[in-house]
Structures are given as C-alpha cells and as structure tokens.
Amino acid sequence: MLHANSQLLVDTLVGLPLLNGRYSGLELVNVVGNDKRGFFSLVFKAHDELEDRAVALKFFDIDPQKQNRYRILCFEREHQILVLLRGASRCLQVMSDFMVFNLEINLPGQSNPIVIPAPYFATAWLDDDIDDYFNQQEAVDAISKLKLFNDVVLAVESLHSRSIFHRDVKVDNLRQQRSNGRREVVAIDLGTAARCDSPPMLPAYGQPVGLLSYSAPETFCGLAGNRSIAPSTDMYALGCMLFELFHPDDFPSALRFANADFDLRVSALQSRIGAGTHDGERMEAWDIEAPRLLNGLTAIRLSSESSSAPSAIIDIVSDLILEMTRANFRSREKSFARVRKRIWCAIRILENVALARRRSQIAAARRQARNEKARTRALRNASRLPSIAPEVA
Ligand SMILES: Nc1ncnc2c1ncn2[C@@H]1O[C@H](COP(=O)(O)OP(=O)(O)O)[C@@H](O)[C@H]1O
Ligand SMILES: [Mg+2]
C-alpha cells in the first residue's frame, strides 16, 4: 500500500488534464494491487502531446520514509547518466530535463497552500517486460531464452562500453521493445548506476548500492562503490539471471542452499575488509582474505532433474554460470563477448539437435512411405498373379 502522501501525489497527477503543459493521461504503472516494482519511485505511463508519443514519467516517491539524501542524489544522478546516453543504441532514452512538480495542499490554519516538491523526468516508454522468460520457463523454448539472454548481455555491454555500470541488473530492470523490426532489450533504472570517472557518492559503501538480491560478495565488503570492480559485479548479476532462466529457484537461495555457511564466510570477509580506510587498503585485504575465505564453496550446477535446460547444453550453460558468478571477482569471467560467444555456441548445438531430429523424422517418414509403397506393390502383384498364370487344362 502506498503512503498517504504518495497516494495524494498519484491522485493529483492522474487527475491533471495536462502535466507541465505536455503530458496527458497519466497512469501509474509500477503499483499493481499490493505489488510495487521499484522502491523509491512512482512510474507513470503518459502521452507526450508535444512529441506525440508514449513516455514513462519517473517520480521520486514522496513517502517520508524514502526521503533519504543518498537516494535523492542517486535520482538526480540517474537523470545525468541518462543524458550521457542520448542516442546510444540499446540504452534507455531520456525525453526531458530534470523537473519538479510542486504538489500544493491546502491545510486548515494555513493561509497559503503548503508545497511538497516531487522531482521527476521522462524517458521513452518501453512496452514489454521480460518476466515470462523466467516465470514461464517450461513454456518458453531454450533457444528463445538463450537469445533473450544474449540481448540482455548486449544491453549491459552497451552501458559498459560508455563506462557506465548498472549495478542493479535484474529482471525488473530490463524491458524489451521492437526497433527496426528487431527485438531489443534495454536496461532501465540507472538509479544505482555509476560512471567510471564519477566520484563515489559515499566515502565507503559498506553495503550493496541497490536493494540487490544479486549482490556479489565484494559489494558487502566496502567495495560496492569501486568503479574498477563494478563491471564484474554486473557480470555476477547476469550469471544469476542465466541460472534463473533455466532453474525455478532464485540464484541467491540456491547458492545458500548448497552452501549453508555462505553468509558466515561473507561476514568474516566483511569484518576483515570493511575496516580498511580506503579502496587500496580494502583491495589488498581482499587479495589476502578472499581466496582463503571463499575457498571450498560448492558450485551450483544445473541438472537435468532440476532444470529446464536441455541435456545437450546443460554443461556449457552450467560452466558459463559458474564462471560468471565466481565469488571472488578476481577469477570471474570478464568478457561479455566471450559470454555471448558461448551462448551462441549453445544455440547452435540446440539448432543442430533440432535439425538432426528433423532429418531423422524425415528419413523415418520416407522409410515408412517406401515400405508402404513396397507393400502396396506386393499386394497388387499378388492380386494380379492368377490372371497371369497359365490356365491349367
Ligand atoms: N521506460 C519505461 N517503460 C515502461 N515501464 C517502465 C519504464 N521505466 C520504469 N518502468 C516500470 O516501472 C518499474 C519501476 O521503475 P524503475 O526505474 O525500475 O524504478 P526503481 O528505481 O524504483 O526501481 C519498472 O520495473 C517497470 O515496470
Ligand atoms: Mg527498478
């Protein structure tokens, strides 16, 4: 349920004929019943009368419990990062300046209305989520899932190629659209994203920067703000997603199920590394402590009983997940190109399996037709035989 202040903002915006002289028909989209997507925002679909197109309007939620200085700065930075991505392919396109809507409320005993500022900005509207690939995984074929994953990797890669690291990669934060007749996945929600050259907004991040369920161990150890590790942290999240495309459990639960002591190890690591006063010190401590404390973890692999991955690609996908989600970022896969190459290798294997199956079905059908024909011929011949046989006097 929304806070009363947030609800008042929603009701006011939805009741406006035109917001800021250009946005009409506002409809809240990230709250459905008691489910809310995203914690700090209120997102509306609207029609931009000026550009004559659908847009998403992202407001910072005015719930008093969410008025956290760091989060508000993140929201401002999100817009700044989006501006840098203007024109970049597979990247969310910002459609407005950073704006503020002043919610005016008349209160008894006040001669003038009180004003609560609600910051917001507009982005391109992206029609579809990618939920079904994960939630209906038995119903979606493996090749489609791998192709989706390839597009997800391309979306994150596109950000990285511009030195922007998402740091909250997850299903909720990815959407798809058709562009020039081809499907394109786009990463939304750059609220926790960072630029390589921007200074961290907090001196040390003791905790993950997003409300992440895919937080890699380094993000708990005061290294969440480290720009040189950020690419590996996104890689880890992508590995978790690859696992979840083929397994009904979420990766963090599966990891803890296989390693009941995982959080103890991370806590020990956190206490040894988090004490460091600067990143150099923390990185040095990581290189001493992490190999020891993270050694001996049980790897999670897909199996034919527990997963929806066809047996022909179980090993290739399992190995890839393992390399993308290595607890020590030093040994984690670094190259997105290599990841995509292996995904395409799995796709080709499945295509070949399908082709071989089709060929053997065609061969079997031909064999059956031949046998059928031979039988018919034999029957025909047998029925003709008496007329051909010489008559016996
Ligand atoms: N550009 C967009 N197009 C369509 N839906 C969007 C768009 N941006 C956000 N949404 C919807 O709003 C939800 C929350 O937006 P998000 O940017 O992730 O906010 P938060 O920072 O609160 O997580 C998304 O999961 C998605 O359902
Ligand atoms: Mg989000």
Image (tube, rainbow, N blue to C red):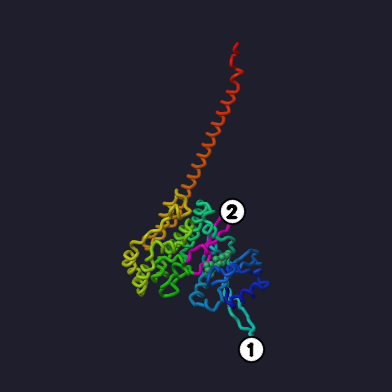
* Labelled pair 2, 1 in contact (Cβ < 8 Å): no
Instruction: Verify whether residue 347 appears in magenta.
Output: no
Instruction: Verify whether residue 170 appears in magenta.
Output: yes
In the rendered image, which residue does mark 1 sit on?
109
- Quadrant where the N terminus is found in the figure: bottom right
Residue 322's tag is none
Residue 181's tag is 2
Q: Earlier in the sequence, mark 2 or mark 1?
A: 1
Residue 200 x/y as whole percent? 43, 72
The image quadrant of residue 298 is: bottom left
Task: Determine the residue positioned at 63% across, 68% down.
Answer: 27
Residue 199 left/right relative to 129: left
Residue 152 left/right relative to 257: right
Residue 179 x/y as whole percent? 58, 56
Instruction: Identify which amino acid the numbered label 2 is placed on.
Output: Gly
SS for callout 2: loop
Q: Which residue is at the front of the view, 299 or 125? A: 299
Respond yes or no on whether mark 1 lies under 8 Å from ligand 1: no
Instruction: Identify which amino acid the numbered label 1 is placed on.
Output: Gly
In the rendered structure, which segment of residues is drawn in magenta? Answer: 168-191
Residue 144 left/right relative to 267: right
Q: Which residue is at the front of the view, 57 or 302? A: 302
Q: Which residue is at the front of the view, 3 or 118? A: 3
Q: Is residue 277 visible?
A: yes
Asked if 137 appears above or below 101 in the picture, the reply is above
Q: Residues within 10 Å of mark 2 (few under 14, many from 20)?
A: few
Circle nearer the viewer, 2 or 1: 1
The image quadrant of residue 136 is: bottom right
Q: Is residue 82 visible?
A: no
The image quadrant of residue 267 is: bottom left
